[in-house]
Amino acid sequence: MAQVEIYVGDGAKKILDVDRDLDHEFQTLSGIGDEAYLEDGAVFVHAAGVWVAIRLVRLDDPARYHKPLTDLARTVAGRL
């Protein structure tokens, strides 16, 4: 079981900013949209002037979902 949250627009960027202020660790995802970042349980994509945040809430190891979230970011950026 999982919970998936999708945010589009200014709210997505605000979540990224808040997580940065909380000193969360991010990995820059090169070649995805104008900019993209991955953190445990979330991915953030900026493409075509639009921010998208996708958060995945699971109770197991978040590292298991780094590749699926990265792939999802690539798909989102390609569709914006």
Image (cartoon, rainbow, N blue to C red):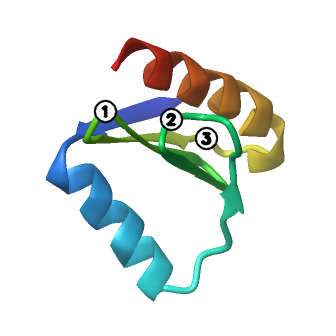
Residue matched to label 2: 33
Residue matched to label 3: 58
Q: Where is residue 46 in the image (x, y as percent from the top left)?
A: 40, 44
Mark 3 and mark 2 residues within 8 Å of each other at the beta carbon: no
Residue matched to label 1: 48
The disc labelled 3 sits on which kind of residue? Arg
N-terminal of the pair, mark 2 or mark 1, is 2
Q: Distance between the residues labelled 3 and 2?
A: 26 Å
The disc labelled 2 sits on which kind of residue? Gly
Badge number at residue 14: none
Q: Indicate left or right for 37 with 4 as reference.
A: right
The disc labelled 1 sits on which kind of residue? Ala
N-terminal of the pair, mark 3 or mark 2, is 2
Mark 2 and mark 1 residues within 8 Å of each other at the beta carbon: yes
Q: Is residue 25 above or below residue 16?
A: below
Q: Nearer the viewer, residue 68 or 51?
A: 51
Q: Which residue is drawn at 26% across and 65% down?
A: 14
Tag nearer the camera, 1 or 3? 1
